[in-house]
Image (cartoon, rainbow, N blue to C red):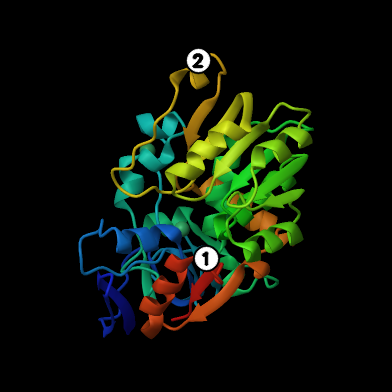
Amino acid sequence: MKAAVYYDPDDIRCEELLRPRIGKGEILVRVRSCGLCGTDVSKMVEKTVAVPIVLGHEVAGDVVEVGEGVKNFRSGDRVCVAHHVPCFTCHYCRHGNHSLCEQFRSTNIDPGGFAEYIRVPALNVKNTTFLLPENLSYEEASLIESTACCLRAIKRYPLQPGDTVVVVGAGPMGLLNLQLALLLGADKVVALDLMEQRLKVAEKLGATQSLNPGQEDPLEAVKQLTGGRGADLAIVAVGKITAIAQAIKLVRGGGTVLLFAESPPHSLLSLDPNVIYHSEVSLIGSYSSTPQEQRMALELMKTGKLKVKELITHRFPLEKLSEAVVLARGARESLKIMITP
Ligand SMILES: [Zn+2]
Ligand SMILES: [Zn+2]
């Protein structure tokens, strides 16, 4: 089978690999669509993974083989699959930090979503594999994992009627966060991005206001929308220190800044600690998702209330993964990029 194997940012090869063999409780999935995630891009660009490796974890496809004892799936089923499975019982899981669970970090699909076929281990078959309804395309379904990550993040702040959310960075994840904030009860959502194109999409998807912080100071606008207070929640969906610093200024006293993107390694944030003490601002993070949010994301997507087709701008075959990475890094005309093995 074909797979896109990463060696170096300038060296991603489409290679012939052995098709994985499945065992008891496992399934083999023919990948039809796999989203290129910001974390895939940063792993490649920052060289934080051991090579060679097949990345990709936002998978949708067809079950083509089921192992002994698999009851919930059969050949021909359309499914989406997520890669990490928490144990739900360890110290981290019991505290809601599922993505820090040892099992979570050690589980994965084999070899990765940028391949024609993947072996889905038994734990993933049980917990992170979902049957797709007919009204969801493979492409839409490959956004279930990203949506689940956003849901997990937003759930960390109990939104109340009348609340205002600022989304810093209107890339694919920012635009999902924007929509989810509205669906989960935010009254107003302000989107910030340096790209006009992205701001236009944000408005189409329901942003109350969208602003380019390179051209105007968003503080005035946010204050005006909130009776002078500032936003209740700011979601920073871009891995930039300047964006985080900006978000801290935009939240009200007692507000929350949620870090939702990976900053480059060794980044340092300077912060007046009194922002946290006197102003009671919370600085929190959210990484990845659990089967619970994946199920929620699927249910939400079934309803059609979440607009995901609008986020998909490009499609590339396995052979052109490196081109896709260059496009994603530029973060210009592209939003979500799909790899179609
Ligand atoms: Zn992802
Ligand atoms: Zn655990």
Secondary structure under the numbered disc 2 in the rendered image: helix
Residue 9 visible, this orientation: yes
- In the figure, 268 relative to 28: above or below? above
Q: 202 or 260, which is in the foreground?
A: 202
Q: Is residue 308 left or right of residue 31?
A: right
Whole-percent x, y for residue 225 in the image: 77, 36
Q: Quadrant of the C terminus?
A: bottom left
Q: Is residue 341 left or right of residue 214?
A: left
Quadrant of the image occupied by residue 48: bottom left
Q: Is residue 305 visible?
A: no
Q: Nearer the viewer, residue 33 or 195?
A: 195
Q: Residue at x 63, y 74 (%)?
A: 137
Q: Secondary structure at mark 1?
A: strand
Residue marked by disc 2: 277
What amino acid is found at the position of numbered circle 1 in the picture? Cys
| Ligand 2 quadrant in view | top left
Label 2, residues with CA under 10 Å away: few <14, some 14-19, many ≥20? few
Task: Judge depth for marks 1 and 2 and give the one in front.
Answer: 2
**CA distance for labels 1 and 2:** 44 Å
Say which residue appears at 62% left-offset and 52% top-offset: 215
Q: Residue at x 78, y 39 (%)?
A: 187
At a point 44% along the width and 20% down the height, the residue shown is 273
Quarter-of-image position of residue 18: bottom left
Local crowd at mark 1 within 10 Å, few (<14), some, or many (≥20)? many
Answer with left or right where residue 2 lies relative to residue 219. left
Looking at the picture, which amino acid does disc 2 mark?
Tyr
Residue closer to the observer: 63 or 139: 139
Residue at mark 1:
80
Location of residue 172 by image quarter:
bottom right
Question: Residue 124: percent from the left, percent from the top?
Answer: 42, 57
Q: Position of residue 203 (x, y in %)?
A: 74, 58
Disc with the residue nearer the chain's start (1 vs 2): 1
